[in-house]
Image (tube, helix red, strand yellow):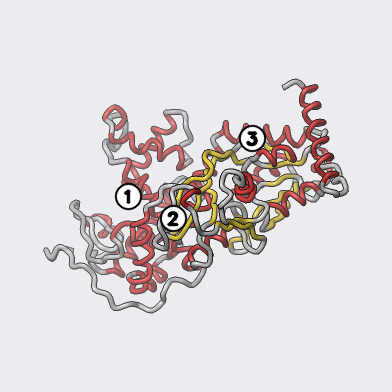
Amino acid sequence: MPASLVGIESMVRLLIVVLITLLWGCTPAPPPTALDDIQERGTLRVGTLLNPTSYYLHHDREAGFEYELAREFSNQLEVELEMVPRYSVRDLFQLLQDGKIDVVAAGIDRTEKRDALYRFGPAYQTITQKLVYKQGTRQRPRDFDELEDEIVVVSGSSHHEFLLSLGDRYPQLNWRATDDHDAEELLDLIMRDEISFTIADSNTLDVKRRYYPDLSVAFTVRGETPVAWALATTLDDSLFAAVIEYFGGLRDSGQLAHLIDQHFGHVSQFNYVDTQLFIEAVQTKLPRYLDLFREHAGTLDWRLLAAISYQESLWNPRAISPTGVRGMMMLTLPTASAMGVQSRLSAEQSIRGGARYLERMLQRVPARIEDPDRTWFALAAYNVGFGHMEDARRLTQQQGADPDRWLDVKKRLPLLRQKKYYRQTRFGFARGNEPVTYVGNIRRYYDTLVWLDERGRIPTLPLDIELPIGSGDGVE
């Protein structure tokens, strides 16, 4: 777009903001900061929502998808990052209007009303919005005409704006907006039967269903919706231009897809039965082996070790596969021997051996690869073998992708089933789709265990349960 047109667009936007501000009876906001002001200040102030999908503190360290995006942007600008968390989108927009933050990075979706008041950077994610209720509590409505119970949404949210727009079409619709709860808490209220329905963004719902599988979707209320950073309207385009350039580079380099996969790639596929059975097993089976996972985890997170064991054997020490692997960690006979395991049917020996074997895989992954990719590579190697995993990494490099990124390698692992690819590799054929599923499942189980553990929802007392008997052939 020519510079003259950009300037005209900026003036029009600014005029709209001034007119709306005057109509609302407020004093005009101070002029937003330009890129030079940020660099002179030495700090980028980013408003965000305090929730698991945007920004949170983990062991006193900042984390979250939006935090990582903002941190990378501040590094590119060579300034410090100051995250300004709030619980309400409305509060964030007020801070932006008052010039107290430079950008809103909180999974904000674009709407017509917001477009008239703010500038949005390039879309970096696409979400849908769902009407959510608790499964088993009522008959599922198929559309708003079938809806009788109340919908509760966050005041000032895009969900609030959407329901306001439905007034003429559905005058009978029963709903209210609240300032007392955020979107996460409304989903909690659904599970506690304190409210009937809410509207949730698909990425938030995907994460929440790992712990609450009974959160059910009635129907989609808004389809593909772009998510972007919001900036104040200003005559100075420097910060806006920097945001556009930043996301363009992030997308072209593959780093954006990498970050999205790290945070959301493993939760988009939801299986109600599998999630329900896992949470039930945490309550009934895991307590029997909890101390063993903690004792033998070594340098590993015991919850990761427990997640691997569930994926391998469903926490059954006598499990056996058609290929001869067996026990809690499903070790082969050569691997068990190498790890000093004398009886694969001993839960303690199997857990200890599996932990040491995973540590060995982690040590073999090139040191330049950082977590969490390092862990995903080690898990893939645990499942398919280190040689096959390295074949997939070499194939990834040959195809011009990054062999040090799990996102790129997991796309090539299934190619090891095809002759035209595996005949060029050192270790030949492999069922390369299996480690992709394997790693995804473990990531989901691990997330659920972390969430339950941090809230004290994993029983500590062993339960007296009967486990399935193994093959009975006496071979250990």
Q: Which residue is mark 1?
A: 383
In the rendered structure, which amino acid carries the disc numbered 1?
Asn
Q: CA distance from mark 2 to mark 1?
A: 33 Å
Element on which disc 3 rests: loop
Residue 375 appears in the figure: no
Asked if 203 appears above or below 177 in the picture, the reply is above
Instruction: Tell me the quarter of the image containing the C terminus.
Output: bottom left
Comparing 371 with 16, the one in front is: 16
How crowded pointer 3 is (Cα within 10 Å; few <14, some 14-19, many 20+) is rated as some
Q: Write down the residue under mark 3.
A: 122
Could you tell me residue 263's position as x and y percent? 52, 49
Helix, strand or loop status at disc 2: strand
* Residue type, label 3: Pro
Is 338 on the left or on the right of 78, as rendered? Answer: left
Which label lies toward us, 2 or 3?
A: 2
CA gap, disc 2 and disc 3: 31 Å
| Mark 2 or 3, nearer chain start | 3
- Disc on the earlier residue, 1 or 3: 3
Circle 1: is it few (<14), some (14-19), or many (20+) Cα within 10 Å?
Answer: many
Amino acid residing under circle 2:
Ser
Figure check: 382 above or below 59: above
State the residue at coordinates (26%, 37%).
429
Residue at 80% across / 43% down in the picture? 38
Quadrant occupied by the N terminus: top right
- Residue 275 point in image, percent of width and height: 38, 58
Give the crowd class for mark 2: few <14, some 14-19, many >=20 residues within 10 Å.
Answer: some
> Residue 305's spot in the image, x, y percent?
39, 61
Name which of mark 2 and mark 1 comes first in the sequence: 2
- Residue at disc 1, secondary structure: helix
At a point 42% along the width and 60% down the height, the residue shown is 138
- Nearer to us: label 1 or label 3: 3
What residue sits right under mark 2 in the picture? 216
